[in-house]
Each structure stands twice: as C-alpha cells, then as structure tokens.
Amino acid sequence: MNRRSVYGLLIAQAVSVTGTRMSVVAVPWFVLQTTGDALLTGVAVFVEMSTLVAARVLGGPLVDRIGPRITSVGGDVIAGLVLGVVPLLYVAGLLAYPVLLVLVGVVGLFRGPSDNAKYAMVPDVAATAGWSNERAAGLADTVQRLGSMIGAPLGAVLIALVGAPAVIALDAASFLLAAALVAALVRVRRAEPDPAEADHRTGVGGYLADLGAGLRFVRRDPLLRAIVTMVLLTNMLDQALTAVLIPVWATERFDDAAPLGLVFGALSAGAVIGSLLVSMYGARLPRWRTYALAFLLGAVPRIFVLVLPVGLPVVAGVALVGGVLIGAINPLLSAAEFARIPAGLRARVLGAVSGLAWAGIPLGGLVGGVLASTLGATGGILVVGTAYLLVTLNPLIRRRTWRLMNRPASATTPVSVPA
C-alpha cells in the first residue's frame, strides 16, 4: 500500500491549519493596533470568514472540474502570495484599510476551495493507503483540532515576540509550504465525470448547472438533509455559548478570564483524544448508534454543568469527557458522507454541506447576545442546553433516516480484486 499521499495530505493540513489559526489571532490584533477601532476589526474578520464560507459552497464545481489536487495547490499558492502582500505593504507604508479588506477577502476566496479540495481528497488517499474512511477522517480531524489548539496560542506568543505583521507573513509561508507538500507527495486519481452532466460542462451555464447538481444531491438525500439541519443548529448554539454565554458566565461567577481557558482547553484536548480513538477503532463501531450517543452524551452535560453549584475542576472534567465523545462526531459523519456521495460530485456536495452547516455560526453570536442580555448567563445557558438536548435527540427519534449512516452489508464483506 502506498501511504505517501495520505501522510503528505495530513502534514499539509497540519501546516495549513496551524498557520491559519495563528493568522486568526494576528489579523484582528493587527487591525486593532493599526486602526484602534474594534468595529473595523470585526468588519475585517467578517469579510474574511464570509468569503471563505461562500467560496466553500460556490467553489465546489470548480474543484470537481479542475481536480482537488490542482485546486488545493493553486488555492494555497494564491492565498499565500496575497496574504504575504499585507506585511510588505505595511512595511512600505502603503497598507490602507480598504486595501487590507480586499486582500483578506481574496485570501478567504481561495482558502475556501483549497480547504474543500483537501477534504475531498481524504477518501481517495485513504483508499490508496488501504485505510478505512473512519481512520483517515479521524486522523484528518485530529490534525485539524491539534492545529487549532497549537496555532492560536503560538500566534499570541509570536505576536508578543516579533509582532503581528511577522506572524501574518509566517501564515503566508505556511500556505506555500502546504501547497509544496501536496504537489510533491499527494497523488489522487481524477474521478470520472457523470455522463449525464456532459452537456453543460462549459461556460457560466455549465458552472451553475454543476453547482445546482451538488445542491440538488443534498436536497434529495435524506441523510445529508438531516446532517445539514442538525449541524447548522448545533453550530449556532455552540457559537452562542463560546462567543457570548460562557464568557459572561466566567465573568459573573469568577470575575476572571482564566476559567475560559481551562474549560475550552479541556474540551479541545478531549476532542483530540476522541478523534484519535475513532481513527484507531472507528471502523469497528456502528456509525449511527455511536454518533447519536456521542453527540447527546458529549454535548449536553458539558452545557448544563455550567449552571450547577459545582467547582471549576468538575466543570473542566465534564468538558474533558464531553470533548472525547464530541471528537468522535466529525469522523463518523465524514465517513458516512464519503460513502454516500459519488466521487464526481464529491467536492460540490461536501462544499454545499459544510457551507450550509456553517451558516448558523454568524447567527450564534446574535442569539447568545440576546439571551445574555435578557435572561443572564444562567438563563441563556439553560435555554441553549434545552435546545441542544432536543436537537441531539433527533438521531434517536428519526432512526430510519439516521440509520443510513451505517455501512451497507456489502461493506463488511471482503472483495476479491484480480491482479
């Protein structure tokens, strides 16, 4: 088995995610330092994230047409070069705020398809290495979570040592390094296009038809519809918690920001352990039942424990255990999606699923703000926890739909392939 491609893709993802998380800290800090305006800082972050989310959905047809490997390399190269212009213009004294907005927006536009392409290559490199989709998806998710854990604190330390412009330059270099790794190490076989789509593969009409094919596939597939709906709602509720309600809770209860780091750190560490365990043992687990119980038992208790009269070590312990269970969710979802989506539609459908699921994130901050201002931290957490409980019961109630996550009987039967 050739495992060079799968290791190359995982290392490229680790480099890209770590650099991006450093930039997530460095860009807002840089804007705040250079403008002194929190609103302008928020606008810059919104521009980059909104273009990223839009590009994940709208770039799917281009990934399927061009190929995920070329898209990943090209997207990272362009994003790295454009982001590298930011510190250069700053040093030259030519970086006006509108120019910065354009540059971070362009970075988001090319990051979206590149990230989507790397995700779409996971089942191909897994097959090349002889790995199960659960193993490859679990390791990819572990890399993402580790990069997030390391990148943000590392970015903050480096800002203190060398300044935000230098950290942005390092992120630009990480894009170029990720592109070089994929170009040198990753080899995937191009998926054959669907013959039914052959009439509209050129021009704007062809692009719109390809985009519509991905969205129609999501709309017609009952499992993908259920995944999008559930993850959209939980993303919104998670954002309400992490962006507003838990910080307000820490302020009201401890008058200190340290509990935030402890709770979020415990949750993140647990999630890394959980995704790593799925990469090792996920192929032996029933997907639907594991997913349903992990989501319910991992997500709900770590919310309600915040309002109980217990000490911070108990809260952190529940968050750690909940994180282990939560870490199993994404790899199991990814494995089910890879199995259901035709290779020729993979980037379009995965882009549509992730883009639609992320649509709840911008609303989450607004929901959290309204709940905190009207009900306080405790009341808001109870409302979000109750809503989360109802959402996570869905896979146990609508069993017929969610059982489609399970492997078909033929997937467990050895297949003889002639030499």
Image (spheres, helix red, strand yellow):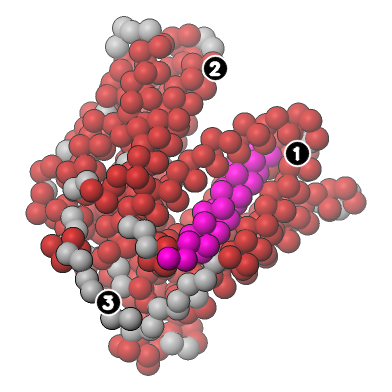
**Mark 3 element type:** loop
Q: Earlier in the sequence, mark 1 or mark 2?
A: 1
Q: Earlier in the sequence, mark 1 or mark 3?
A: 1
Q: Residue at x 76, y 29 (%)?
A: 160
Observer-nearest of 45 and 163: 163
Residue range of the region highlighted in magenta in the rendering: 1-26
* Amino acid type, label 1: Ala
Quarter holding residue 192: bottom left
Whole-percent x and y of residue 68?
A: 50, 70
User: Residue reaching furthest front?
Assistant: 419
Distance between the alpha carbons at the discs numbered 1 and 2? 23 Å
Quarter holding residue 28: top right
Whole-percent x and y of residue 311?
A: 38, 7
Q: Earlier in the sequence, mark 2 or mark 3?
A: 2
- Residue at label 3? 417
Q: Is residue 318 magenta?
A: no
